[in-house]
Image: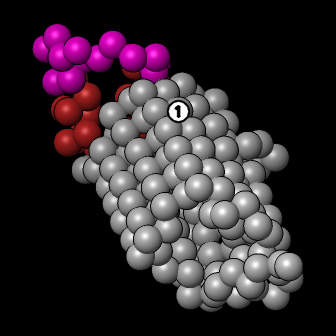
Amino acid sequence: MKKLLWVMTLFLFGFGVNTSSAFDKNDLAKVLNEEDCPRCDLSGADLRGAELLGIDLTRVNFRSAKLKGVLFISSSFCPHYSPQLEDADFEGADLEETDLEDAKMNRANLKNANLSNSNLTDVVLDNANLENTNFKNANLMRASLVDANIKGATFEGVNLESVTWINGIVCKKGSIGRCVLTD
């Protein structure tokens, strides 16, 4: 797999494909080769379909990155840091068991994404597309979902305590699997 990704990277950068965006080409090559890349700049990078398994992505800038179908299982994003993932496209991405605590994911596209068993404590998902997203057994405590599209999303076993729901009202303590709205 690493060889295939390396060949794809060489093709992308070696044959004049337009890569005009803010990401660092060396950082992209590291990530595509499944190397740890803390503090990398991948803003605007196209990582669709990549497998990023168990690598250190702490403090990586994914703003406006194309992450459709990316497999992030057991990757590290944010010890003591708020990942900046605004406008990122995670459509169909497998983010199972991912720690995204305190991530800023305003306007992110998470349609058909798998966030089961993930730590999403204090995550901001305002105006995000969460259509058909699987949150099964995730922790969304104190998250914000204001004006998010949650059509078809799965919240089975999800901790929704103190979540700011799509209508701006806060879920009551003990909200598991569904938001019990405060008065």
- Asked if residue 35 shows in the view, the reply is no
Q: Measuring 33% from the left and 50% from the top, which residue is drawn there?
A: 68
Q: In front here: 86 or 59?
A: 86
- Residue 7, quarter of the rendered image: top left
| Relative to 95, residue 50 above or below | above
What residue occupies the far left of the structure in this picture? 15
Query: Please, what is the dominant secondary structure of the magenta stretch?
Result: loop
Asked if residue 155 is positioned above or below residue 30 in the image, the reply reads below
Residue 60 position, x and y percent, is: 59, 35
Q: Is residue 13 toward the left or the right of residue 23 in the image?
A: left
Magenta stretch, residue numbers: 11-24
Residue 46 or 8: which is nearer the viewer? Answer: 46
Residue 32 on image: x %, y %: 36, 38
Q: Amino acid at mark 1?
A: Arg
Residue in the picture at 53% in, 33% down: 63
Where does label 1 land, which residue? 63
User: Is 136 left or right of 81, judged from the image as shown?
Assistant: left
Residue 22 magenta: yes
Q: State the residue in front, 167 or 143.
A: 167
Instruction: Check residue 170 for magenta coloring.
Output: no
Residue 161, placed above or below residue 20? below
Lateral position of residue 56 relative to residue 112, left or right = right
| Residue 134 position in % (x across, y down) | 47, 74
**What colour scheme was applied to this rendering of the protein?**
secondary structure
Name the element at disc 1: loop
For the question of whether residue 23 can be seen, the reply is yes
Task: Judge from the rendering whether residue 84 lies leftward or rightward of residue 112; answer left or right.
Answer: right
Q: Is residue 149 above or below residue 180?
A: above
